Image (cartoon, rainbow, N blue to C red):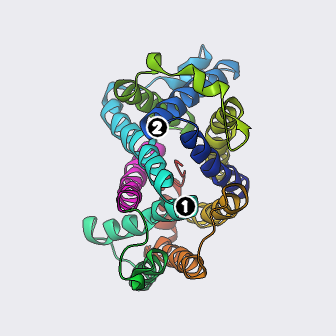
Amino acid sequence: MVLTAGALFALNGTVSKLLLQGGFDPPQLTTFRATGAMLGLLLICLVMRPAPGQRTPFSRLTVRRQELPRLIAFGLSGFFFVPMLYFVAISRLPVGIGLLFEYMAPLFVALWVRFGEKQPVKPRLWVGLALCLGGLACVAQIWAGELTLDTIGVIAGLTCAVLLGFYYVLGSKSVAERSPLPVTFWAFLVAAVAGSIVRPWWNFPGQLLSGSSGGVPMWLLAIYLLAFGTISAYLLVSASMQHLPPTSVGILGMIEPVLASAFAWILLDEILAPAQILGGLVVLVGVVLAETARATTSARAQAKTAQQTPAIPPT
C-alpha cells in the first residue's frame, strides 16, 4: 500500500507540473485539488454503509465544536499551504528537487521533539542533520559560486517542509482522536474554503481543461490528480497504517522523491547533475536517521507513538 501510494504521489508531481504549464497557477491548482478531493471523499461516504450505531453514511463526518479550531489549523497548514507551496516549488525547480525540500519535514519534527517538547533523541539526529545540510549543498551546487536553483523555489520548498512538519505534529493529535477519513474530509473542506477565497472556484477558467499540456489532455491530467494522485493515494497510506508503524510508513514513503525524479526525467526531460543525484540520496539518508532518532523508553511508549504519529504525505 505504501509503495503504491508513493508511486501515485510521485507521478502526481509530473502531472501537477504539466497542469501548471498548461495554465493553472499554484493557488488555483490547490483550490481545484482540495475541492475535488473533498467532493470525492463525500461521495465515498455516501456509498459506504453507516457505521454501527449511526443512522446515515454522513454521521461518520460529524465533529464536535471544540475540534473545529484544530481541524481548521490542520486543513490550512497541511492541505492548503503545503500543496500550494509545493506547486510553487515544482513550477520553479525540477520536480525531484522540489519534493526533496518537502521531505525534510521529518527532520524539523525531530528537532521540534528535541527542543520544543524537550524529549530525548538518539545521537543519530545530529548525524542526520549534518547529512541533510551536506546533501542540500550538493543539490544546490554551492561550489558554482552562486545558488544554481531558483531562490523563490528554494524558499517555497523549505517553507513547505516547515509547514509539513507542523502538520505532522498537529495531526498526531487529530488522527489519535478520529479515524483518518473524517479528518481528511474536513481538512480538504477547510482547504477548499480557503482556496475559494484566494482563487474562487466560480471564476475557474473551464477552457483550460479542453487544452493539452506536454501532449496530454488537461482533463485527463485533472482526473489523475484527483482520483489517483490525491484520493486513492491518501486512502492507501491511511489503510497501510493499520498494518505498519508510522515510522516504517514514513521511511518506505521516501521512495516518492526517487520515483518522482525518474518520472520527471522520462516525461519532462528534467535531468539532474550527478552531484545533485548524490546530494539527494544523502539528504534521504539524513532524513531516515532523523525519522528514527526519537528515543522511546518502553514498549508502551512505542505503541503510543505508533498510534499517534501520522505519516500521510500531503503532496
Residue drawn 56% across and 58% down? 95
In the displayed structure image, the side of residue 122 where residue 277 appears, left or right: right
Q: Bin the neighbour count of mark 2 within 10 Å (Cα to Cα): few under 14, some 14-19, many 20 and up.
A: some
Tell me where residue 32 appears, x and y as whole percent: 52, 29
Q: Amino acid at mark 2?
A: Asp
Tell me where residue 224 appears, x and y as whole percent: 69, 37
Q: Is residue 262 visible?
A: yes
Q: Work out whether 23 lies above or below 267.
A: above
Q: Amino acid at mark 1?
A: Pro
Question: Label 2: which residue?
Answer: 25
Q: Which residues are magenta?
A: 151-176
Instruction: Determine the image quadrant of residue 191.
Output: top left
Q: Nearer the viewer, residue 52 or 47?
A: 47
Describe the element under mark 1 as helix, strand or loop. Answer: loop
Tell me where residue 139 appears, x and y as whole percent: 49, 75
Reply yes or no: does residue 261 show up in magenta.
no
Instruction: Determine the image quadrant of residue 140.
Output: bottom left
Residue drawn 73% across and 41% down? 215
The image's mark for residue 94 is 1
Picture mark count:
2
